[in-house]
Amino acid sequence: MDLPGDAVPCARPAPPAISVVLPAYNEAANLPRVLQALREALPALAAHHEIVVVDDGSRDATPLLMQQAASAQRGLRYLRLSRNFGKEAALTAGIDHARGDVVVLMDADGQHPVTMLAPMLDAWRAGAQMVCAVRESRADEGLAKRVGTWLFYRLANIGSPVPIPAGVGDFRLMDRRVVDALRALPERNRFMKGLYAWVGFETRLLPYMPEARQAGRTSFSLRRLARLAFTGLTAFTNFPLRVWSGLGALIALVSIGYGGYIVLAVLLYGHDVPGWPTIVTGIMFFSGVQLLSIGILGEYIGRIFDEVKQRPVYLVGAQYGAGLPLPAAAAGPAAGTTVGGPALADRAHPGRR
């Protein structure tokens, strides 16, 4: 991907301040191992660093564990959202509150290897503004998930204004310019993989293989993944509307042709018009198509309704710990305040623009 305008990537020899964002939901069994791995790796990568754990309304021991860890570990910040808003909202909260020159997004389940941070930083120093980890293989996933993932990226990229790289998730490193660009996007229905692609900037892909999950189970069932995929298709592309517009045109042409056939059959051969079975079948078919079309249209109208309400993407119920210092003239949100979404976060971080 090319940089906007005339900007040219340049080498960055100075060690940056690093923020590592970990969205977490019921990951009490995995967080200690992940935090320990980051504590060991980050000092060798940067003198100034922080870990931002965003708790998306966990119901296990995550709150107690992270409150204790934030009070004992320097450079660890813990944000507890007021309820479960979903991973996209948790990622948005972490991006809004990260203060580093570069921001790394990782999962809290330990499947994203910490060893990838060094090559990511090397690519950033070489000029890349976003460094994405792309899976080398999905052989460890079930057939249904592999097929669903392939189908989603195919459909999304057919109607997407910008291509979304297949196999690339949220595991990535972003320059501060990319972070500020993401924070400037106003939409509430956020599909992060689409937004990463939309902002552009110089991007490099690095292959990796996820590590085996050591404890617990993923909260993303096939049902939730299907819902996220549908959200991505309707929030980031108008492809479903185009499909049904084309289907409607095709059905109209077939109907005109069939109607012409009936007229000719009656005029030329004197055949009677077919009776009720044909009529009832046709009515049921077209009624189903109309209802499905109305449902898809309703999804888009519902998202417009959500955007018009201007509710925040997330609410922070509490904050613990201290990470990197805020830049001059910036005032961070106090613990216990409610902050959510780009607009409110801008008030909390006025110096980031």
Image (cartoon, helix red, strand yellow):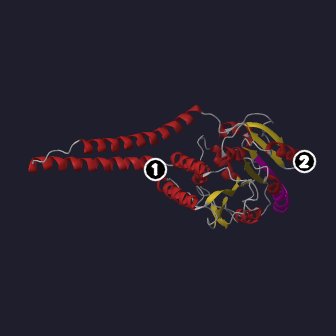
Residue 116 in the figure: left or right of residue 185: right
Image coords of residue 184 (percent x, y)? 63, 44
Foreground of the two, 279 or 290: 279
Which numbered marker is on residue 72?
A: 2
Q: Residue furthest top?
A: 309
Question: Label 1: how many residues lie within 10 Å, few (<14), some (14-19) or many (20+)?
Answer: some
x 23%, y 50%: residue: 257
The quadrant of the picture occupied by the C terminus is top right
Judged from the image, the secondary structure of the residue bearing numbered disc 1 is helix
The quadrant of the picture occupied by the N terminus is bottom right
Residue 227 in the figure: left or right of residue 12: left
Image coords of residue 238 (percent x, y)? 47, 47
Residue that mark 1 sits on: 239
Question: Label 2: how many residues lie within 10 Å, few (<14), some (14-19) or many (20+)?
Answer: few
x 84%, y 63%: residue: 44
Reply yes or no: does residue 37 show up in magenta.
yes
x 50%, y 49%: residue: 237
Reply yes or no: does residue 140 show up in magenta.
no
Image coords of residue 31 (percent x, y)? 79, 52
| Mark 1 to mark 2 CA distance (whole Å) | 50 Å
Amino acid at dot 1: Phe
Whether residues under marks 1 and 2 lie with C-beta atoms below 8 angstroms apart, the answer is no
* 19 vs 119: above or below: above
**Residue 163 in view in this figure:** no
Judged from the image, the secondary structure of the residue bearing numbered disc 2 is helix
